[in-house]
Image: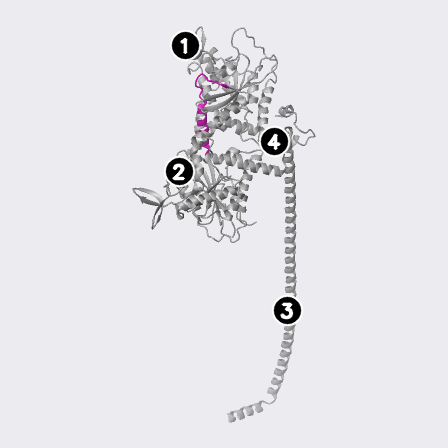
Amino acid sequence: MASSEVTRQLQNDNCRPLSLSGHVGFDSLPDQLVNKSINQGFCFNILCIGETGIGKSTLIDTLFNTSFDDRVSTHFQPNVRLRAQTYELQESNVRLKLTIVNTVGFGDQINKEDSYQPIVDYIDAQFEAYLQEELKIKRSLYNYHDTRIHVCLYFISPTGHSLKTLDLLTMKNLDSKMNIIPVIAKADTISKTELQKFKIKLMSELVSNGVQIYQFPTDDETISKINATMNGHLPFAVVGSMEEMKVGNKMVKARQYPWGIVQVENENHCDFVKLREMLICTNMEDLREQTHARHYELYRRCKLEEMGFRDTGPENKPVSLQETYEAKRHEFFGELQRKEEEMRQMFVQRVKEKEAILKEAERELQAKFEHLKRLHQEERMKLEEKRKLLEDDMIAFNKRKAATELLQAQAFASTPSVTLKKDKDRKNFM
Amino acid sequence: MEGELVQPAPEETPRDANPANVGLELFGYVGIEAVLDQMRIKTMKTGFEFNLMVVGQSGLGKSTMVNTLFKSKVSRKPTGPGYEERIPKTVQLQSITHVIEEKGVKMKLTVTDTPGFGDQINNENCWDPIIKYINEQYEKYLREEILISRKRKIPDTRVHSCVYFVPPTGHWLRPLDLEFMRRLSKIVNMVPVIAKADTLTLEERAEFKKRIQKDLKAHGISVYPQEDFDDNSDDRILNNKIRDKMPFAVVGADKEHQVNGKRILGRKTKWGIIEVENPAHCEFPLLRDLLIRSHLQDLKDITHNVHYESYRMQRLNESNRLALSPINGLLGKDEVESDL
């Protein structure tokens, strides 16, 4: 909104401009606001979409001049996942909570039909979380850690020809949900002339397919000129590198090849500086605002309409919203109760089953016990029998012994000489 | 649906900053602090809104005070002799809106005056229209916020600060003052001031202030800056200093006089000229600094984050009960207000 628009709007509200006869002091208001924001800190969330190995992590490292977590991923992911990491950066007195979301496995599958769906789901999930917080009765929005994606860096492969179908499809599905800034990755593989043609081809393809990429705002005089020029340079051809090399008498970030050194921060070599300038120094606030005021509002509108709310007559609004809200809440509550009931049933069932199993085990145990007892009894009986037999045998044997002894004693008494003779004979024989 | 969306693994939640990643070192200049300038530019473009309400018995110098605060004829009250101001039979609320600009910063200032407050013989419930007005503004904002397609910038008419003028009796707070402040400090930022402080000597002033502070504490009235909302220890130290000096003893004047060769705002009496902006004479500069130069944004923030939120919470909780009643559409606002 240009300043003239503001005054016009304010005047339309039936208020007169008033002239001050002295210094009042509210010119410190922007500073008060800035101080408050410094105390609160800022949030910024970047989503990087691009194929594996295209240089997403390196570019982010280079952009923020620090080494984030660099986990190299394989090419064999079965589907696309998103990996989000939050970092707290501080520069002078500004604290930035930076969240970087990377797509893992994008473009690696043989069948790429579902590639963009996880991304859409993720973005919607962040919007949903914010919406839920906003709809709460007791909410704390000013403390809320905003995870909505503020900007998406879309990495285009430097083929030199045109956009891939996957890229086109993904961007088409995402352009209404967030601010997309396409960048040409690994720009050191394209020559200058090819780059020009490539850029023109890309932009025309985007336009002809109706993809709305983020345009840097040109409504504020201070930055409109530079933004307009930058808009003409889209998409930015970037090179990322964290390795430093000595060029001339300075250490610069560069990539070294046998045929030369590509300097990252040299505007003749690539557009990295432009990207950093636009993304961070000039338009970060605008990106955040667009996300909140345009993309989030669109999501909110669609979601609320889906849930059945309507902006009917102005008198019915708060009440009818609450009615529907209440109805929904009752619905949810009912479902909650149903689920609880279900779980309780399941629990009771499980307990019964367990009891049955335990009873079964007990019975088995009992049966075994009985069985063993019986065996024991039988053994015992057998033993008893044997013992009896044995005893009988012993008695019989004793009897026979006694009888034989008796006979022997009688025989010995009647024929003693015979015995001697027998003995003598025996001696003669020996 | 397995695994496409990383509902992030415990060590990768975007919600909590991985402790190992807190305070990452930047190897060189990135330009993050440029976001402050961006913010500044944006807010200068959109402009600010500020809504002030002044409450007090007639004749305490409310309109003059507002004019002195904003150094312009915000409230156009004829001050010549022979003008008889008719005291209205009930409390009225009059809002005037102006656009003022200073050094490129535009502000839409709305001042709400309350003639008739405390002027009747029977002043019971004279605060009701005021409470109703304040809640109406919250209601308006709430309705805009609940809309499906809502405006990019919701017009903010909520009262950010209520300046209550205490008559300079020098004794204690009157029952009317206590009742009013007790009720209003719960829904709006209340800034009490001792009006027409030029009738009190400095010692009387100090005594009066102490008594008022004791009174407020005894009745559990928390005036702005409220202790509960101090963000950090720096804030607390600063606000404690302010709280020690509250309520400010102010004098309002919108005429300029010659003092020592300079033109100064002041009140000319036979026994001297009371310089409004002289901290030795009165505490007007402190009030102005609090309201405008240092805590304006804070006033707005507390109104938005605390008072508005509690109104919203109450309203949404209420609507749940009332929504089931057969009365459809707009429930009588009075019905709603009387519950609050």
Circles 4 and 1 on the same chain: yes
**Whole-Å distance between the Cαs marked 2 and 1?**
54 Å
Amino acid bearing label 1: Gln
Instruction: Identify the mark at residue B204; answer none if there is no mark.
Output: none
Crowd rating for badge 2 (residues with CA inside 10 Å; few <14, some 14–19, many 20+): some
Q: Nearer the viewer, residue A31 or A188?
A: A188
Q: Please report the bounds of the magenta region as a residue range.
A: A17-41
User: Is label 4 in a helix, a strand or a loop?
Assistant: helix
Residue, disc 2 = B30
Residue, disc 3 = A379
> Which of the two discs, 4 and 1, sits closer to the camera?
1
Amino acid bearing label 2: Val
Q: Nearer the viewer, residue A421 or B67?
A: B67
User: Is label 3 in a helix, a strand or a loop?
Assistant: helix
Residue, disc 4 = B316
Residue, disc 1 = B258
